[in-house]
Amino acid sequence: WIIHAAAHHKIKDFMKKPNIKAKNNILMVKNLITFAKKNNIKNFIYFSTIDINYSPYPIKKNIYIKSKVFCEKILLTAFKKKIIKKLFILRLPAIVGIQSNNNFIKNTLNNLKRHKPIKIWNKNDNYNNLVHINDLNKLIFHLISKKSNNRKEIIDCLSSKPIKLENLIIYLKRKLKSKSKLNYIYKKNK
């Protein structure tokens, strides 16, 4: 198995020389396919991004997301050519858990702990844009353990039970006994 977690994935990394970072992401996938072919490795798990499903792409993530789209196409072509027999593309949201990268939930929790004001856009939208690292590990183990042959699957790794964003923030605020003020931002103000 090859499990390709990331070359460049932090959006702040894409602020400097985004085109070079995108090319590096694509080159890494091409190199791994070449490596798989030379070493007769037929199974591949690729960490993509859930942001591919949203349109239009956020401006600050545009080049990053396009690099992920291109990488997925390269991998799907390798699958069609039978270079890869099993291909699982995991479209990941924010990963939460111990030592996770900065993301909306982690930043919100830190701000709530410090009693800082919280800005909430789209308060009535359902939120499920996260996966816990332990659940991701279980999914990978399950995929590797499956006995099926010649299979490809694109999996959106979102939490299964969305919650209204406002309710999530209020729940976290209560749980942490935070004195943070909640500021609702409406599209007009955004």
Image (cartoon, rainbow, N blue to C red):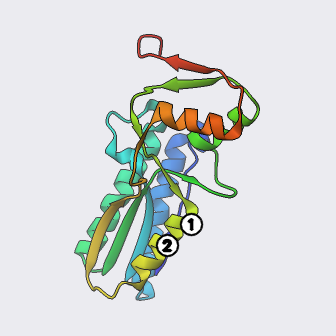
Q: Nearer the viewer, residue 18 or 145?
A: 145
Q: Tag 2: Cα neighbours inside 10 Å, few (<14), some, or many (≥20)?
A: few
Q: Quadrant of residue 170?
A: top right
User: What residue did someone put label 1 on?
Assistant: 134
Determine the residue positioned at 39% across, 32% down: 125
Label 2 and label 1: CA atoms lie apart by 6 Å
**Residue 52 in view of the camera:** yes
Determine the residue positioned at 31% across, 63% down: 154
Task: Please give the count of numbered marks on the rendered protein.
Answer: 2
Determine the residue positioned at 43% across, 81% down: 144
Q: Tag 1: Cα neighbours inside 10 Å, few (<14), some, or many (≥20)?
A: few
User: What residue did someone put label 2 on?
Assistant: 138
Judge from the rendering whether residue 47 lies leftward or rightward of residue 107; answer left or right. Answer: left
Determine the residue positioned at 56% across, 42% down: 11
Question: From the viewer's perspective, is residue 166 above or below residue 95?
Answer: above
**Residue 108 in view of the camera:** no
Question: From the viewer's perspective, is residue 155 above or below residue 108?
Answer: below
The local secondary structure at tag 2 comes to: helix
The local secondary structure at tag 1 comes to: helix
Q: Position of residue 128 (x, y in %)?
A: 43, 46
Q: What amino acid type should be assigned to the residue bearing mark 2?
A: Lys
Tag 2–tag 1 contact (CB < 8 Å): yes
Q: Position of residue 10 (x, y in %)?
A: 58, 47
Which residue extends farthest right? 114
Q: Position of residue 14 (x, y in %)?
A: 56, 41
Q: Position of residue 65 (x, y in %)?
A: 42, 45
Judge from the rendering whether residue 179 lies leftward or rightward of residue 159; answer left or right. Answer: right
Which residue extends farthest left? 80
Q: Nearer the viewer, residue 175 or 147?
A: 175
Question: From the viewer's perspective, is residue 41 above or below residue 186?
Answer: below
